[in-house]
Image (spheres, rainbow, N blue to C red):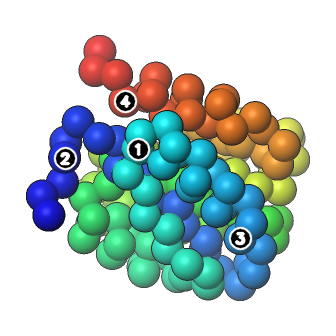
Amino acid sequence: MPHNKNKIKILIAKPGLDGHDRGAKVVAQALKDAGMEVIYSGLHKTIDQIINIAIQEDVDFIGLSIMTGAHIPITEKLMKKLKEKGIEDKKVFVGGVIPSKDIPKLKELGVEGVFPGGTPLQETIEFIKNKTKTP
């Protein structure tokens, strides 16, 4: 089935050993309900697996769901790999247990949006729609 370019395509990914996926599934469902195409990686994915899914599925966004506190090293590794593969056009957002003091660091790494636990789903949906609009 060809990818409908009018539909925003998002990969929700669970990197590393994090076994908590309720939040990721809730976000994935909310984005689907908002008319977006969502691929969920499943648990315990390596950065390489996440990148490969993003390339195969030709997604517009990669959303990392991280509850382990390892969001900075994981995000650093992802951003580095995106650059290596020449796919920095994929927008990245991160959600999960993220202290507000880490948000500037994540943005510095190139993350477009950071959504700590408890962020209203509508905020994530609006963020993605706004980031997709052509300038």
Q: Nearer the viewer, mark 1 or mark 3?
A: 1
Left or right: residue 100 compared with residue 79: right
- Kind of residue indicated by mark 3: Asp
Where residue 38 sits in the image (x, y, percent)? 43, 56
In the picture, the disc for residue 4 is 2
Which residue was labeled with disc 4?
Answer: 132
In the picture, the disc for residue 36 is 1
Q: Nearer the viewer, mark 4 or mark 3?
A: 3
The residue that appears at 34% across and 65% down in the rendered structure is: 54
> Which of the two labelled residues, at mark 1 and mark 3, occupies the earlier sequence position?
3
At mark 2, the secondary structure is loop
Mark 4 in CB contact with mark 3 (< 8 angstroms): no
Q: Could one spot residue 70 in this view of the protein?
A: no
The residue that appears at 59% across and 59% down in the rendered structure is: 64
Left or right: residue 121 compared with residue 135: right
Q: Quadrant of the N terminus?
A: bottom left
Which residue was labeled with disc 3?
Answer: 21
Q: Quadrant of the C terminus?
A: top left
At mark 3, the secondary structure is loop
Q: Nearer the viewer, mark 1 or mark 4?
A: 1
- Label 1 to label 3, Cα distance in Å? 19 Å
- Residues packed near mark 3 inside 10 Å, few (<14), some (14 to 19) or many (20 plus): some
> Between 76 and 53, which is closer to the camera in this rendering?
53
> Between 8 and 32, which is closer to the camera in this rendering?
32
- Kind of residue indicated by mark 2: Asn
